[in-house]
Amino acid sequence: MTYNEIASNLAASNPIHLITHVRGDADSASVFALALALRQIGKTVSVAHDLPEHLRWLLPAAQIPEHPFANALLVALDTGNVGRLALDRDTRKRIAGLIAKYGNETATPPELLRDLCAIDIVIDHHESNLGYGTLNLIDAQASSTAEMLTLLLQELERITATPLFTAEICQYLYTGIVSDTQWFKRDTATRTYTTAAFLEAKAQIDKIAIAERLDTRSFGYFRLGETLRRNARSDGGLMASYLDLAAMREAGIPPDEAAQMTEELERLPGRLFVLFVQQSPTEIRVRLRGRGVPVLELARRFGGGGHEFRAGAVIATEADMDALLAAARNLLDAASA
Ligand SMILES: [Mn+2]
């Protein structure tokens, strides 16, 4: 599907329900740019998201309902996994049960997933996205969902002849781009520059304010750093660490904020980085980063997904942790051979 075709579909639909992923980030929050734009062209819009506490400043001033209206067009954004969609508890549980039955999402028959959750349109930049929507706009060349939404809103503006790039909308899109690219330091292509320049020309964007807000960490975050360093193990180019629930509780940091410690870990001189973050007694989130070493396949093998050099998964036990580390070591050996 092209940007124009998706924009035409949105222009022709009403109401519209937008769904992003669990453990939201500044890029998934660019969904609010789309929501506000759709409202400007007269649509009834609802947004299902899961923004963690430390990112609540990204919520729009205007109230946007979280639950879909009857017969709404369902649009999923910023995730390649149906299992990661910020759906209601019940549906998520049923999807998780189905995926568990087949081992991982890739092995789960798409039609069975569709029975539980029939997405009309998918908009995403993750390479691992197989296209679980009726219509799919998957652009792995895009730095972020925010970059994609900038292009999409340009089309929508043309189709509806309604100016859509308000200061608030530009702010959302820009924040998503700089967050996913770490201020144009990674996944940045010429088009990322073009879209960012377009937004900068449309609105006065306070970059310092955005940078400060994105960099804000709780005091406990720095205390949790002690656990990150204490549990760190290096083995050749493999760097791994583990943040357990007890340590997070003691530091007063929820797992979502703790997961940002991947950024510190990947500053170490290594080639493959693995951060385990215990989400609950039965769930361990894995964040994978590769420096020149592709990690997407490894994530997939453990039921996850993401990008070639940045991916993630959720595993269950400490035995899974060992299995993943062993697989990571093999991967590194194969890459060095
Ligand atoms: Mn993203």
Image (cartoon, helix red, strand yellow):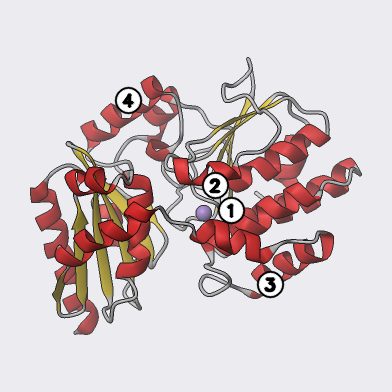
First-in-chain label (1 vs 2) = 2
Asked if residue 316 is positioned above or below residue 331 in the image, the reply reads: above
- The span from disc 4 to disc 2 (Cα, nearest Å) is 22 Å
| Residue where numbered disc 2 is placed | 28
Q: Nearer the viewer, mark 4 or mark 2?
A: 2
The answer to which of 282 and 57 lies nearer the viewer is 57
Q: Is mark 1 within 8 Å of ligand 1?
A: yes
Measure the C-alpha gap from mark 3 to mark 2: 20 Å
**Mark 3 or mark 1: which comes first in sequence?**
1
Q: How many marks?
A: 4
For disc 4, the neighbor class at 10 Å (few under 14, some 14 to 19, many from 20) is: few
Left or right of residue 156: residue 145:
left
* Beta carbon of the mark 2 residue lies under 8 A of ligand 1: yes
Amino acid identity at mark 2: Ser
Percent position of residue 101, x then y: 22, 31
Circles 1 and 2 in contact, beta carbons < 8 Å: yes
Foreground tag (1 vs 2): 2
List the residue tagged with mark 3: 193
Alpha carbons under labels 3 and 1: distance apart: 15 Å
Q: Earlier in the sequence, mark 3 or mark 4?
A: 4
Q: CA distance from mark 4 to mark 1?
A: 26 Å
Q: Is residue 89 above or below residue 294?
A: above
Q: CA distance from mark 3 to mark 4?
A: 40 Å
Mark 1–mark 2 distance (CA, rounded to whole Å): 7 Å
Identify the mark nearer the N-term, 4 or 2: 2
Residue matched to label 1: 145
> Which quadrant is the C terminus positioned in?
bottom left
**Mark sitting earlier along the chain (4/1):** 4
Badge number at residue 93: 4
Type of the residue with mark 1: Thr
